[in-house]
């Protein structure tokens, strides 16, 4: 009778352990899901921020290009005025070529400035896409907390049953 009582108590204790272990597995999966949700939320916010930065860089590129071209146009006008003051015909020859080269250099420098900002904008777009995918993956990788809990319960119950049946032989 004592061995049956001992085996019963052992089985009861084992099942209590299985219950606590299953509850722990459930809570752990739940906590991991909360963590994934938080990380997904933060990744989404980082994606929005990177996208906003990309828009800023695009705007800066456009304004820097226009500003650079205006500066070089002003320089060409100063050259024209200086040549005219010296009595040089500014509509022909090397004086005209110099002004045209200055303006062309302005366009080149402006396009280069815009390209550099467009490149920064592209990098921010890629970062935004990366964060968006990270957010989607985080939400998709959540686990139903009952799955690990039931897995733990089935495995633990099997172990308790095997122990109990070996004692009852």
Image: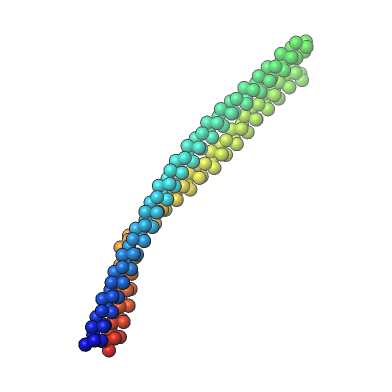
> Residue 40 in the image: x percent, y percent?
41, 49
Q: Nearer the viewer, residue 139 or 7?
A: 7
Q: Residue furthest left?
A: 1
Residue 89 appears anywhere in the view: no
Q: Is residue 56 above or below residue 141?
A: above
> Residue 103 in the image: x percent, y percent?
67, 23
Q: Residue furthest bottom?
A: 169
Locate residue 10: give its quadrant: bottom left
Indicate left or right for 92 with 128 as reference: right
> Residue 166 in the image: x percent, y percent?
30, 86
Q: Residue at x 68, y 20 (%)?
A: 75
Q: Is residue 121 above or below residue 71?
A: below
Indicate left or right for 93 with 127 as reference: right
> Residue 169 in the image: x percent, y percent?
27, 89
Q: Quadrant of the N terminus?
A: bottom left
Q: Residue at x 68, y 27 (%)?
A: 105
Locate residue 68: give its quadrant: top right
Locate residue 149: give its quadrant: bottom left
Q: Residue at x 31, y 82 (%)?
A: 163
The way the protein has been coloured in the rendering is rainbow
Count the marks: how many? 0
Indicate left or right for 143 with 122 as reference: left
Q: Is residue 78 above or below residue 166?
A: above
Indicate left or right for 14 with 111 as reference: left
Q: Residue at x 43, y 43 (%)?
A: 45
Q: Nearer the viewer, residue 51 or 150?
A: 150
Residue 76 appears anywhere in the view: yes
């Amino acid at each position: 009778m004592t061995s049956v009582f001992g085996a019963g108590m052992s089985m009861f204790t084992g099942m209590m352990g299985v219950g606590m272990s299953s509850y722990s597995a459930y809570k752990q999966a739940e906590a991991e899901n909360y963590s994934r949700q938080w990380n997904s939320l933060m990744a989404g916010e980082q994606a929005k921020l990177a996208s906003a930065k990309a828009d800023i860089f695009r705007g800066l590129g456009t304004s820097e290009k226009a500003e650079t071209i205006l500066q070089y146009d002003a320089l060409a006008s100063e050259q024209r005025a200086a040549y005219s003051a010296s009595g040089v015909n500014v509509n022909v020859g090397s004086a005209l070529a110099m002004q045209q080269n200055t303006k062309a250099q302005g366009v080149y420098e402006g396009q280069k400035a815009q390209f550099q900002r467009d490149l920064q904008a592209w990098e921010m777009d890629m970062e935004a896409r990366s964060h968006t995918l990270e957010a989607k993956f985080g939400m998709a990788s959540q686990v139903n907390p009952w799955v690990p809990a039931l897995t733990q319960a089935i495995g633990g119950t099997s172990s308790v049953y095997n122990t109990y049946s070996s004692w009852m032989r």
